[in-house]
Image (spheres, grey):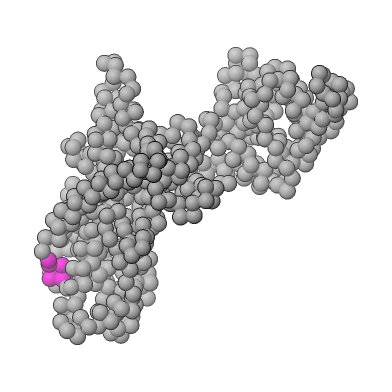
């Protein structure tokens, strides 16, 4: 999981009188009301005590968010867990957070971060209630950042605000460091952070919430059974590999050059072909797709080229083929590697001469159509084995675009999953359908052998089996929930290498820890960063 993938609607469930963040009840408050509360605090206990109270409040809040983030998600790296803090702060409406610099060393405990808080709600509160301040006044923000980072680093981290809108600066800025790195400079600020064992309380609450979460999952399964249910267009592109494919497609689109799209079944070859058509000068015309592998060769010839009445038994009238029907548009020949030699020869003639012969006719007909073909087969190997014509391959492969499998573009999994959730919300008339945040790690951990098509089918299943229009882990196919267990069923041959044994053991421990990488690292006796490097090496 990456910090930038956090979405508010997947984290928070809004009910009647209850706002729930996976077991933590939240309450919305008015910024105006909090401004008056701040003013009353200052008048009752003084500026210094008010600062101490609000800093401690923010610290506890940051601790609790850090605990929730490690309880709900398995992070790609410790740094991603840390960066989820600024992201959560932004999602909660506190400020727009920009991390300027960050350095962390888990081994030595050294930590340094500089952040900018744009449109700080707390600065706005202070200005509204007390007017311009003599010094930085985003006390809850510094407390939150300190509490979150301290929980992640397992040692005290302190943020100090250097600039503040409440004090007349253009933007609020703060610096966070570990106590040793601050040195004597920290001493005036320490008193604002002193409190009872906040982190110990948060850890205790976190364990209690985990138990309640498991109990809620059991209750939802029971409810599903009582209700008679069983358990079990291009979107945002983040991966560099698919961006490269799109770049080639975009550059090829304006030209009538033949394009061959290759890739595994279900990876999105037709989606890319439609994208090329929509970016071309033929976009206003028809796009016709035909699965060449699904039709016998005699029927495929009639389907593509058309036929004359009486050309064969059952041909009672003239028929226009797809090449003519796609006039001035695009024809997409899917599974082109499955056609026989006779059809290969006829298709070669079409590409060379831009004309077709209807079955039963001897007069050629000129065509104006763009051809895009696709295959999941190795056509070079088919050429070497004499199963595919080399000259036809050259004609089809003027431009070749390889669509990477989903397991090689994992950054695209969550955008695709969200896209499908919206799609099925409309199709299945489930207007409030949403992904729950607990699903995300499972979606990211699975290898998706069926690619995008398998992901789409899994989300449709999950939407149908969802309870209260919320897609939770129990609605996903079992093999996605238990991916590590499925992998563990692979061969246990003694001939496996040491690296294979280590890899399988790591995945078994991850499965035992329900995907929690921090806990798995503790069981394995290695640091989370070492675990991350080992998992990264597999991809």
Q: Is residue 304 above or below residue 236?
A: above
The x, y position of residue 19, in whole percent, is 33, 61
Q: Is residue 407 above or below residue 65?
A: above
Identity of the residue drawn at 24% across and 61% down? 62
Identity of the residue drawn at 21% across and 64% down? 59
Identity of the residue drawn at 78% across and 31% down? 321
- As drawn, the residue found furthest toward the left would be 196
Identity of the residue drawn at 84% across and 20% down? 311
What secondary structure is the magenta-colored segment mainly?
loop
Please tell me how many numbered marks the rendered image carries.
Answer: 0
Q: Nearer the viewer, residue 453 or 177?
A: 453
Q: Is residue 186 visible?
A: no
Instruction: Tell whether position 243 is magenta.
Output: no
Q: Is residue 91 visible?
A: yes
* The quarter of the displayed image where residue 528 is located: top left
The x, y position of residue 334, in whole percent, is 63, 30
The x, y position of residue 94, in whole percent, is 34, 68
- As drawn, the residue found furthest toward the top would be 385
* The quarter of the displayed image where residue 263 is located: top right
Q: Which residues are magenta?
A: 189-195
From the viewer's perspective, tell me whether residue 359 is left or right of residue 275: right
The C terminus sits in image quarter? top left
From the viewer's perspective, tell me whether residue 273 is left or right of residue 237: right
Instruction: Tell whether position 191 is magenta.
Output: yes
The x, y position of residue 526, in whole percent, is 20, 38
From the viewer's perspective, tell me whether residue 24 is left or right of residue 282: left
Q: Is residue 439 above or below residue 356?
A: below
């Amino acid at each position: 999981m990456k910090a930038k993938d956090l979405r508010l609607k997947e984290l928070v469930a809004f009910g009647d009188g209850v706002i729930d963040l996976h077991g933590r009840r939240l309450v919305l408050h008015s910024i105006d009301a909090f401004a008056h509360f701040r003013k009353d605090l200052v008048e009752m206990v003084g500026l210094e005590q008010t600062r101490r109270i609000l800093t401690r409040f923010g610290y506890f809040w940051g601790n609790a968010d850090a605990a929730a983030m490690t309880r709900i998600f398995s992070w790609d790296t410790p740094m991603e867990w840390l960066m989820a803090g600024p992201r959560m702060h932004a999602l909660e409406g506190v400020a727009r957070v920009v991390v300027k610099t960050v350095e962390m060393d888990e081994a030595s405990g050294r930590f340094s971060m500089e952040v900018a808080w744009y449109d700080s709600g707390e600065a706005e509160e202070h200005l509204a209630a007390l007017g311009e301040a003599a010094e930085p006044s985003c006390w809850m923000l510094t407390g939150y950042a300190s509490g979150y980072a301290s929980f992640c680093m397992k040692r005290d981290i302190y943020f100090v605000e250097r600039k503040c809108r409440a004090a007349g600066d253009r933007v609020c800025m703060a610096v966070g460091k570990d106590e040793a790195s601050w040195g004597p400079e920290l001493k005036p600020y320490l008193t604002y952070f002193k409190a009872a064992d906040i982190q110990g309380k948060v850890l205790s609450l976190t364990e209690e919430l985990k138990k309640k979460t498991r109990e809620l999952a059991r209750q939802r399964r029971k409810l599903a059974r009582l209700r008679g249910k069983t358990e079990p267009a291009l979107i945002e592109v983040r991966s560099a590999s698919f961006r490269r494919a799109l770049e080639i497609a975009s550059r090829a689109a304006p030209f009538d050059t033949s394009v061959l799209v290759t890739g595994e079944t279900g990876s999105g070859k037709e989606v890319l072909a439609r994208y090329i058509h929509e970016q071309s000068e033929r976009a206003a015309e028809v796009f016709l797709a035909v699965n060449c592998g699904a039709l016998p060769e005699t029927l495929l010839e009639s389907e593509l080229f058309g036929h004359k009445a009486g050309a064969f038994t059952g041909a009672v009238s003239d028929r226009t083929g797809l090449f003519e029907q796609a006039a001035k548009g695009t024809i997409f020949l899917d599974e082109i590697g499955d056609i026989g030699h006779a059809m290969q020869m006829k298709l070669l003639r079409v590409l060379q001469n831009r004309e077709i012969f209807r079955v039963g006719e001897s007069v050629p007909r000129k065509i104006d159509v763009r051809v895009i073909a696709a295959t999941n087969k190795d056509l070079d190997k088919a050429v070497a084995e004499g199963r595919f014509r080399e000259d036809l391959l050259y004609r089809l492969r003027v431009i070749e675009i390889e669509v990477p499998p989903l397991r090689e573009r994992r950054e695209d999994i969550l955008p695709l999953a969200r896209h499908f959730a919206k799609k099925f919300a409309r199709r299945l008339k489930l207007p409030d359908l949403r992904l729950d945040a607990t699903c995300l790690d499972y979606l990211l951990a699975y290898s998706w052998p069926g690619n995008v098509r398998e992901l789409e089918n899994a989300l449709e299943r999950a939407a149908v089996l969802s309870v209260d229009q919320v897609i939770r882990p129990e609605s996903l196919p079992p093999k996605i929930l238990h991916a590590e267990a499925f992998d563990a069923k692979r061969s246990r041959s003694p001939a496996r290498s040491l690296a294979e044994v280590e890899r399988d053991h790591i995945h078994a421990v991850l499965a035992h820890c329900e995907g929690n990488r921090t806990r798995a690292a503790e069981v394995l006796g290695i640091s989370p960063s070492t675990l991350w490097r080992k998992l990264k090496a597999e991809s």
